[in-house]
Image (cartoon, rainbow, N blue to C red):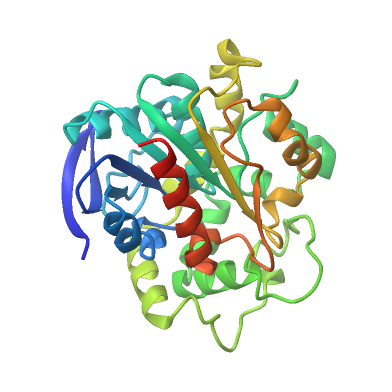
């Protein structure tokens, strides 16, 4: 069973869950999630001989929630990972991320390759710094209706999601799962109706996400959603901050896993980018792993397949 404690890193306090002994594996969750999204990975990775640590990242759960929006930049988030590895008494670590945790993992490998034994991203592919700031680009492409832009508006999504956190999370998880029928569509928001109005509220949760899981997740958002939304509000700032790494290549061994029915790999231009990854990334351990029928919540929807891929990858470089 995972043990829990608070740890001081990078000027803030993070809540972490940890289990096992051996080389360190840091698991980074996304939005709207918590350390609990890795519940199916602790046992198998620990049994495979690794020390597994999953924090509530800054702005989430029991970890600190800085009030300054600028405190959620990619440099702060990578800094948290670097400081966490050091605080745990390690020199190097494997870094694995899902959803927003994937960009943090990828950038940790990009900015601090000396620290990273291997990097794995679930759902979100490795970063490419485009010619324009991402929020501005999506604002122009979709007339302000893309969900990034909706999340960027101060206080708007914060208030909508906080009115009924349990319903918010239930709708989120079902809508982005592989269990939701129908075609994958771009996540556009009617600003007059809000994000949740268009999402179906399922009568029953998918089998991989229980009412108990929803209880844990709902409790972790008792302080609201602003911390997690502040990550989106830094997207253009991140574009500015990462200018020195334009066209830089991730050099540590890398793994990318995504779901066939995940909306993120279906973003404009992303399918073509994923197909080109073996040519773009010489450090890629194997071709991108596509999980049939899997939606956005990769390690929760398909824990056995994800665990097998992670263990094989980690062992190959340990």
Residue located 41% across and 20% down the image = 112
Relative height, residue 289 to residue 119 (above, below): below
Which quadrant would the N terminus be assigned to in this image?
Answer: bottom left
Residue located 73% across and 40% down the image = 274
The picture quadrant where one finds residue 211 is bottom left
Relative height, residue 38 to residue 251 (above, below): below
In the depicted view, which residue is nearer to us: 44 or 172? 44
The picture quadrant where one finds residue 64 is top left
Q: Is residue 29 visible?
A: no
Relative height, residue 112 to residue 50 (above, below): above
In the depicted view, which residue is nearer to us: 16 or 302? 302
Residue located 55% across and 80% down the image = 206
Image position, residue 115 (x, y; %): 35, 24
In the depicted view, which residue is nearer to us: 45 or 72? 45
How many labels were placed on the picture?
A: 0
Relative height, residue 252 to residue 248 (above, below): below
Residue located 22% across and 43% down the image = 22
Q: Is residue 117 left or right of residue 125?
A: left
Q: Is residue 65 left or right of residue 30?
A: left
Which quadrant would the C terminus be assigned to in this image?
Answer: top left
Image position, residue 134 (x, y; %): 69, 32
Q: Is residue 195 left or right of residue 211?
A: right
Q: Is residue 150 visible?
A: yes
Outermost residue, top side: 244
Image position, residue 151 (x, y; %): 60, 48
Outermost residue, bottom side: 203
Q: Is residue 128 left or right of residue 94?
A: right
Image position, residue 196 (x, y; %): 63, 67
């Amino acid at each position: 069973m995972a043990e829990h404690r608070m740890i001081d890193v990078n000027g803030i306090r993070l809540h972490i869950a940890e289990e096992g002994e051996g080389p360190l594996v840091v698991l980074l969750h996304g939005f709207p999630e918590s350390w609990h999204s890795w519940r199916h990975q602790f046992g198998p990775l620990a049994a495979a001989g690794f020390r597994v640590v999953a924090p509530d990242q800054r702005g989430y759960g029991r970890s600190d929630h800085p009030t300054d929006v600028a405190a959620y930049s990619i440099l702060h988030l990578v800094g948290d990972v670097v400081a966490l590895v050091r605080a745990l008494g390690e020199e190097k670590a494997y870094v694995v991320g899902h959803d927003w945790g994937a960009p943090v993992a990828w950038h940790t490998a990009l900015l601090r390759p000396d620290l990273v034994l291997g990097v794995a991203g679930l759902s979100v592919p490795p970063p490419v710094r485009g010619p324009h700031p991402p929020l501005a680009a999506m604002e122009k492409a979709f007339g302000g209706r893309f969900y990034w832009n909706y999340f960027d508006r101060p206080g708007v999504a914060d208030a909508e999601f906080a009115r009924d956190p349990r319903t918010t999370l239930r709708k989120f998880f079902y809508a982005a799962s592989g269990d939701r029928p129908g075609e994958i569509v771009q996540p556009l928001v009617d600003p007059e109706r809000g994000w949740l109005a268009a999402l179906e509220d399922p009568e029953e949760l998918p089998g991989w996400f229980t009412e108990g899981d929803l209880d844990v997740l709902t409790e972790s958002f008792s302080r609201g959603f602003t911390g997690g939304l502040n990550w989106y509000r830094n997207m253009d700032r991140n574009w500015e901050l990462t200018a020195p790494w334009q066209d830089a290549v991730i050099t540590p061994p890398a793994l990318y896993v995504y779901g066939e029915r995940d909306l993120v790999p279906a973003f404009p231009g992303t399918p073509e980018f994923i197909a080109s990854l073996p040519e773009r990334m010489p450090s890629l351990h194997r071709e991108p792993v596509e999980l049939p029928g899997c939606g956005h919540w990769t390690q929760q929807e398909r824990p056995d397949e994800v665990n097998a891929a992670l263990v094989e990858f980690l062992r190959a470089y340990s």
